[in-house]
């Protein structure tokens, strides 16, 4: 009886572990976008690329290079962004800020 209970418990734990791992799914695909900042509104940054158009990004929790946080991003800065799409929103993971030489 003890062996049957041990096997049943081991089987239960195995199924629970596999279910948890499968539920996590695959990691999101990381994309990149670079261009000129056209708008900064709270934690949302709008970037324009002449070839790819305009995109808006949520930079909450992103790792910043060239600035400490979103307050380091100014209109006309050139930035390079790494992001993924979740529920139709562009979620930023990494931002590189390069100061624009053409400050207007």
Image (cartoon, rainbow, N blue to C red):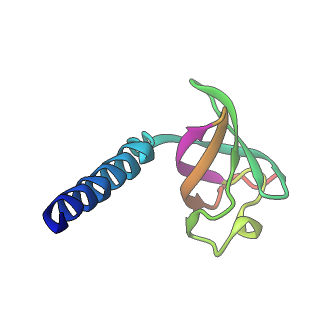
Say if the magenta span includes residue 43: no
- Residue 29 image point, x, y percent: 42, 39
Main SS of the magenta segment?
strand
> Residue placed at 63% from the left, 72% from the top?
67
Which residue is outermost to the right?
41
Look at the image and tell me in which quarter the N terminus lies. Answer: bottom left
Residue 51 falls left or right of residue 73: left
- Residue 88 image point, x, y percent: 66, 32
Which residue is outermost to the front?
1
Which residue is outermost to the bottom?
68
From what the image shows, is residue 52 above or below residue 67?
Answer: above
**Camera-nearest residue between 77 and 44:** 44
Residue 23 falls left or right of residue 63: left
> Residue placed at 53% from the left, 50% from the top?
80
**Camera-nearest residue between 8 and 99:** 8
The count of marks equals 0
Which residue is outermost to the left?
3
**Toward which corner of the image does residue 26 lie, by quadrant?**
top left
Residue 21 falls left or right of residue 58: left
> Residue placed at 76% from the left, 59% from the top?
74
The boundaries of the magenta stretch are 78-86
**Camera-nearest residue between 27 and 89:** 27
**Toward which corner of the image does residue 4 lie, by quadrant?**
bottom left
From what the image shows, is residue 94 above or below residue 71?
Answer: above
**Camera-nearest residue between 101 and 47:** 47
- Residue 68 image point, x, y percent: 64, 75
> Residue placed at 57% from the left, 70% from the top?
66
- Residue 89 image point, x, y percent: 68, 38
């Amino acid at each position: 009886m003890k062996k049957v209970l041990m096997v049943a418990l081991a089987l239960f734990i195995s199924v629970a572990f596999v279910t948890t791992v499968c539920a996590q799914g695959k990691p999101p695909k990381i994309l990149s976008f670079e261009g000129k900042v056209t708008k900064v509104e709270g934690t949302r940054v709008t970037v324009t690329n002449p070839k790819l158009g305009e995109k808006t990004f949520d930079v909450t929790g992103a790792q910043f290079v060239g600035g400490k946080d979103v307050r380091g991003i100014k209109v006309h800065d050139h930035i390079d962004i790494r992001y993924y799409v979740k529920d139709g929103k562009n979620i930023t993971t990494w931002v590189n800020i390069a100061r624009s030489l053409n400050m207007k």
